[in-house]
Image (tube, rainbow, N blue to C red):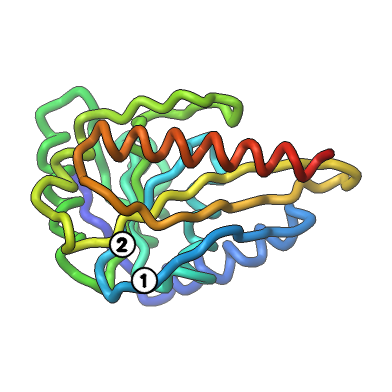
């Protein structure tokens, strides 16, 4: 597997590039929610809707979380876009024995309080309008036995155009409080997503 790297030039460039990219392509970016820094490593989970997801998570890291950014990326895609390896991406090869090594590496990153790890527990792209998330078992290997040792942060990304030619991005955020069992985290995320969708719908009325 390819381990994450933070190149002395490419990583800072990627952060500046993210700000520029969002400013150019979005009417505005709003972060709605609370984040209480507990001084622990942060695991960020979110909805996986498209190409923009990693940039949105990086923006959240810059504005709110302020940790070193790490994220999991399909091996074939990372080999194709090696640039991301120097911005914190590491590889995972799903449906192979190598996936265990990637999950162990992901878990090891969360022993350092300076780190933030982004994962999408559903393991695949899903429509913005999907309201039923099913988390794969991989998240169990990352969370197992780590209650109290890391901070689990839930995010929901939604976009709306309304009266503007450029979309507005809304990043909803909430600290997870509860058991680290996969089914309980999954249920909490689904409830949070439903709440965010209700709030988002009210914005358009």
Q: Which of marks 1 and 2 is nearer the N terminus?
A: 2
- Residue at horizontal 57%, vertical 45%? 157
User: Which of these two is toward me, 42 or 13?
Assistant: 42
| Residue 132 falls left or right of residue 78 | right
Quarter of the C terminus within the rendering = top right
Q: Element at badge 2? A: strand
| Residue 182 falls left or right of residue 25 | left
Q: Which mark is residue 131?
A: none
User: Which of these two is toward me, 75 or 62?
Assistant: 62
Q: Residue 75, image x and y in percent?
A: 29, 37
| Residue 83 falls left or right of residue 205 | left
User: Which of these two is toward me, 110 or 197?
Assistant: 197
Binning the other alpha carbons within 10 Å of mark 2 as few (below 14), some (14 to 19) or many (20 upward) gives many
- Picture quadrant of residue 200: top right
- Picture quadrant of residue 123: top left
Q: Residue 194, image x and y in percent?
A: 54, 34
- Residue at horizontal 51%, vertical 68%? 15
Quarter of the N terminus within the rendering = top left
- Picture quadrant of residue 39: bottom left
Give the distance between the C-alpha atoms of the residues marked 1 and 2, in whole angstroms. Answer: 8 Å
Q: Residue 14, image x and y in percent?
A: 50, 65
On the image, numbered disc 2 is attached to which residue? 42
Where 113 falls versus 72 (above or below)? below
Q: Are the residues at dot 1 and dot 2 in contact (C-beta closer than 8 Å)?
A: yes
User: Which of these two is toward me, 145 or 138?
Assistant: 145
| Residue 115 falls left or right of residue 10 | left
- Residue at horizontal 28%, vertical 67%? 115
Q: Residue 111, image x and y in percent?
A: 15, 65
On the image, numbered disc 1 is attached to which residue? 67
Which is closer to the viewer, label 1 or label 2?
Answer: 2
């Amino acid at each position: 597997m390819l381990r994450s790297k933070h190149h002395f030039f490419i990583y800072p460039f990627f952060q500046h590039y993210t700000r520029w990219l969002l400013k150019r392509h979005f009417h505005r970016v709003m972060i709605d929610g609370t984040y209480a820094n507990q001084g622990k490593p942060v695991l960020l989970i979110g909805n996986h809707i498209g190409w923009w997801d990693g940039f949105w998570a990086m923006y959240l890291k810059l504005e709110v979380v302020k940790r070193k950014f790490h994220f999991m990326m399909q091996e074939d895609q990372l080999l194709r876009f090696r640039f991301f390896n120097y911005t914190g991406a590491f590889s995972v090869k799903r449906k192979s024995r190598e996936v265990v090594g990637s999950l162990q590496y992901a878990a090891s990153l969360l022993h350092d309080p300076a780190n933030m790890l982004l994962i999408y527990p559903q393991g695949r792209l899903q429509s913005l309008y999907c309201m039923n998330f099913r988390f794969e078992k991989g998240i169990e290997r990352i969370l197992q036995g780590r209650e109290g040792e890391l901070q689990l942060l839930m995010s929901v990304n939604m976009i709306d155009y309304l009266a503007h030619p450029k979309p507005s991005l809304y990043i909803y955020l909430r600290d997870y409080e509860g058991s680290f069992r996969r089914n309980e985290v999954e249920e909490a995320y689904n409830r949070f997503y439903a709440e965010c969708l209700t709030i988002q719908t009210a914005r358009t009325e």
